Amino acid sequence: MDTRGILVIGASAGGVAALQRLFAAMPRESVPTVFVVQHVTPSGRSVLPQLLTRAGWLPAFHPTDGEPVRPGWIHVAPPDHHLLVKNGRTLVRRGARENRTRPAIDPLFRSAAVAYGPRVVGVVLTGTLDDGAAGLRAVKRCGGVTVVQDPDDAEWPDMPRNALAHVAVDHCAPLDALPALLARLAAEPAGPVVPIPPDVALEACIPEKEFDIVPNDTDALGPPSTLTCPECGGSLSEIHDGPLLRFRCKVGHAFSPDTLAEAHREAVERALWVALRTHEDRVALFQRMADKARERGHTRVAKDWTASAAEARRSVALLRDVLERQAGTLGSPDGLNRVAG
């Protein structure tokens, strides 16, 4: 009988240290097949496989697209690519970002749930926002077991807390208790095979297609909303996934409410900085025109340009006030001085 020997693990902020601690403490006799998504910067070379290998449990590597799954190895998502699994092979795809990240946790969890069903143990570790919650729910719906790091134990508790809020999680434990728990679960016989929910199967296929998404794929997942995708400007479909509300556009970008709100906040911030820079340029232009008019003896024209410069300065002051009220999300006041000084 097959065991629950497929571990899929997702982590974000604080995840590298958590994964190293977890793998260093795993029982050496436990040799499941492991897939890991750690949110990483899209540029540069990742040394995460080397770090995880040094933990001393199983060897880790970045798989390539179409490579056979290696039992007893840790498959690590490469930077700027989603890691998926299908028909005994890894798929490494650069499709649309999900939850504003690539690699994202949800695509891996969904693909593993469809591919392995009750053999999967899904694990969400430390991180911000809520990537992993929808994927963990897919694991649960396909017969797998769900595990979450205790939020009180996590360096960044948002991801574990959101998973607990939206999924009937089977196990919640501090990091130090996870090695023994995961080794036990991986050795257990898998539960009965359950039918794969059509919506999970459909959504698992979307990141496989990379740039060949068919609009009907997302149309079938939920009705159109009145919202637009902050990544591409397309319309978003509204997906009601049990207690989870999610959004996906026609080219595959996917968002939870938290990540969508964060993306909109960043878009507003960028627009404010552009407006601030533009009004500073207007101040400089209007003041120059006033000086030129004054040099030529055009007093009335100089007065009009001076009034325009004053109006632009008032706009600058208003924008600076709005930006400064968002302190903590926009950087230091020095940033304002560099842009608007």
Image (spheres, rainbow, N blue to C red):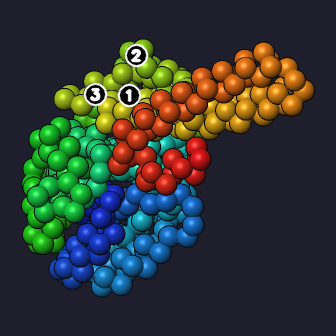
In the picture, the disc for residue 247 is 1
Query: Which quadrant would residue 17 be assigned to in this image?
Result: bottom left
The reply to whether the C-beta atoms of the residues labelled 3 and 1 are less than 8 Å apart is yes
**Residue 242 versus residue 93 in the image, above or below:** above
Q: Residues within 10 Å of mark 3 (few under 14, many from 20)?
A: some
Residue that extends furthest to the right in the rendered view of this protein: 296
The secondary structure type at the circle numbered 2 is: strand
Q: Amino acid at mark 2?
A: Ser
Label 3 and label 1: CA atoms lie apart by 7 Å
Disc number placed over residue 42 in the picture, else none: none
Answer whether residue 128 is visible to the viewer in this image.
yes
Residue 69 falls left or right of residue 276: left
Q: Which residue is mark 2?
A: 225
Residue 245's tag is: 3
Instruction: Name the residue at 24% across, 80% down.
Output: 24
Where the N terminus falls, by quadrant?
bottom left
Q: Is residue 173 above or below residue 287?
A: below
Is label 1 in contact with label 2 (beta carbons under 8 Å)? yes
Judged left or right of residue 86, residue 26 is: left
Q: Position of residue 111 (x, y in %)?
A: 38, 46
Residue 239 image-quadrant placement: top left
- Whole-Å distance between the Cαs marked 1 and 2? 8 Å
Question: For this view, does 121 lie left or right of residue 301?
Answer: left
Disc 1 marks which amino acid? Phe
At a point 15% along the width and 67% down the height, the residue shown is 175
Q: Which structural element holds mark 3?
A: strand
